[in-house]
Amino acid sequence: MINTHHFKDKLEAEKKTLEEELGQIAIFNTETNIWEATPDQEMMGEIDDNDAADRFEDFEGRSGMVNTLQARLTDVNIALDKIEAGTFGKCEVCGTPIEEDRLEANPAARTNKAHMND
Ligand SMILES: [Zn+2]
């Protein structure tokens, strides 16, 4: 039997960390329910063209980071929903229990080891 309290604690801690990280580089759009990368605050000031190019790259990098964090947050939220629904820890492909060491390494894992690449 899986100790869901243990994994719920881990997932909620990770969710908090992800939301804090996202909060520093993005804002949550409550209409679309997605995080959107914020433009660099310093862009508001007067800058020359070279700076503008550099900061555009920063924004691109930040957008990529936001997408990565957001994808991870989605997985974490799905895992938390499964704990509520009582289906946590089952492989989404074959329905058998996910190995505990795999869940320990990644509590948001959606499949067992046999199906980890599906
Ligand atoms: Zn499976």
Image: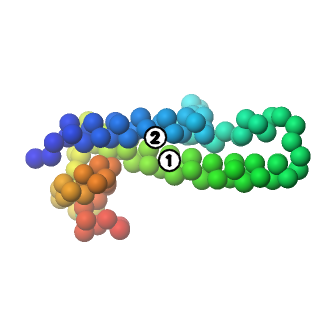
Q: Residue at x 25, y 42 (%)?
A: 7
Q: Residues within 10 Å of mark 2 (few under 14, many from 20)?
A: some
Which of the labelled discs sits on residue 69, or is there none? 1
The answer to whether residue 111 is above or below residue 80 is below
- Say which quadrant the C terminus sits in: bottom left
Measuring from the top left, give residue 19's x and y in whole percent: 48, 36
Q: Secondary structure at mark 1?
A: helix
Among numbered discs 1 and 2, the one appearing first in the sequence: 2
Which image quarter: residue 15?
Answer: top left
Nearer to us in this view, 26 or 92:
26
Badge 1 vs badge 2, beta-carbon distance below 8 Å:
yes
Measuring from the top left, give residue 111's x and y in whole percent: 28, 59
Q: Is 81 situated left or right of 55 in this image?
A: left
Q: Residue at x 47, y 50 (%)?
A: 71
Q: Secondary structure at mark 2?
A: helix
The three-letter code of the residue at mark 2 reads Leu
- Say if disc 1 is inside 8 Å of ligand 1: no
Which of the labelled discs sits on residue 18, or is there none? 2
The three-letter code of the residue at mark 1 reads Leu
Measuring from the top left, give residue 43's x and y in whole percent: 79, 39
